[in-house]
Image (tube, helix red, strand yellow):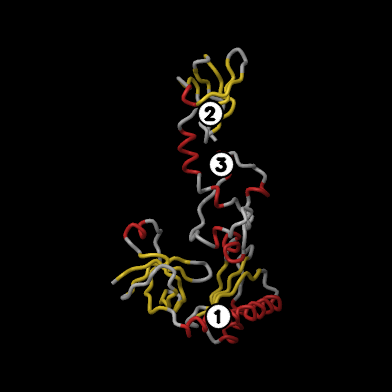
Amino acid sequence: MSRFVVRCGRMRTLYVMSSKGEHPRGRIVIARTNRGLERGEVLCEATDRVVAQMKDPPSGTIQRDATTADENEYRHLEGRIPKDFELCKRFIQEMKLPMTLVDVERIFGGEQIIIYYTAEDRVDFRELVKRLSGEYQTRIEMRQIGARDEAKLLADFGDCGKPVCCNTHLHGMPPVSMRMAKLQKATLDPNKISGRCGRLKCCLRYENDTYEELAAAIPPAGSEIVTPHGRSRVLNVEILSQQLLIQTEDNRRLLIPASECLTVLKRGQEF
C-alpha cells in the first residue's frame, strides 16, 4: 500500500495517508481523516525521508480521486460559507459573546462544521453551539485561534508582494525572535518587520541558520583582536561579507576581511 502527503482543510493540515492506488502531485482526492470525509490535494509520496521531516503528522486514507460530482459538491459547500458566517455572526451579536468570528469551515462529508474565532479569554459558547446545532443538524466544533492562525486563514499578500507564506507553503508556524532581526541587521521598526498577523515575520527564520553559522566564524562587535595592523577593537561586523570595521590603537578606522583577525584577545557581546 502506498503512502502520500495530502493537504486538507482551511488550516492546510498535512496528513500522511495510505492508498491502494497511485496519485500524482496536485491530484485532488477525497480522503478520510479524523475529522471526517475531506477534500484534499496530493503533495508528494510519503517516503521515509519526507515523513522524517514532519512532526507527528496525522494519518488518514485516500478513498478515491475526486470526481466532477465531488468538485461540484465542494463548490456548493463553499458557496454556502458566506451565509453560514453571517448567521453565526448574528448569533454571537445577539448573545453578546466576547469573541470575534474569523471563519467557518464545512467538512466535505458533512460530519461537522468548524467555527474559528478569536477571544481574549475563555468563552462560554454552549448556547451558541446549541443554536447552531439545531440550525444545521450536525456537529459544531468551536476552535479558538491566535493572531498568526487568523492571518493564515484570512491574509492575502505580504510586504514582499507575494502571497503570505502561512497561507501557501508553510504548514507550521516557526518560532521567530527579535534576536533574529538584530542578527540579520533588519530594521527594528515593528511596522516593517511584522507580518499581517502583527507578529514578527516568519521569513526572518529562513536564513537565520546561515547567519548564525557565519556569525560564529567572526568576532562580534566589542571584541579586542590582533590584526596585521596591530591591536584593534571591533566596532561593527558585516556578517554576509565577512568583514570587520575596526579601530586601531592609533585611532584609525579600517574595514578588513575577517580572515585578517589573527587572535581574539577579548570576545565582545554576541547578538
**Element under disc 2:** strand
**Element under disc 3:** helix
* Residue 112 in the image: above or below residue 178: below
Residue at screen point 58% across, 25% down: 245
Residue at screen point 48% across, 85% down: 69
Q: Position of residue 97 (x, y in %)?
A: 67, 72
Residue at screen point 60% across, 78% down: 81
Q: Amino acid at mark 3?
A: Arg
Q: Camera-side residue: 32 or 46?
A: 46
Residue tagged 1 = 75
Q: Amino acid at mark 1?
A: Arg
Q: Position of residue 232 (x, y in %)?
A: 55, 18
Residue at screen point 66% across, 81% down: 87
Residue tagged 2 = 243
Residue tagged 3 = 179
Q: CA distance from mark 2 to mark 3?
A: 21 Å
Name the mark nearer the viewer: 1 or 3.
1
**Element under disc 1:** helix
Q: CA distance from mark 1 to mark 3?
A: 44 Å
The single residue placed furthest to the left in the displayed view is 1
Q: Amino acid at mark 2?
A: Gln
**Label 1 near label 2: C-beta < 8 Å?**
no
Q: Earlier in the sequence, mark 1 or mark 3?
A: 1
Query: Seen in the image, is 38 located left or right of residue 178?
Result: left
Q: Position of residue 67 (x, y in %)?
A: 44, 82
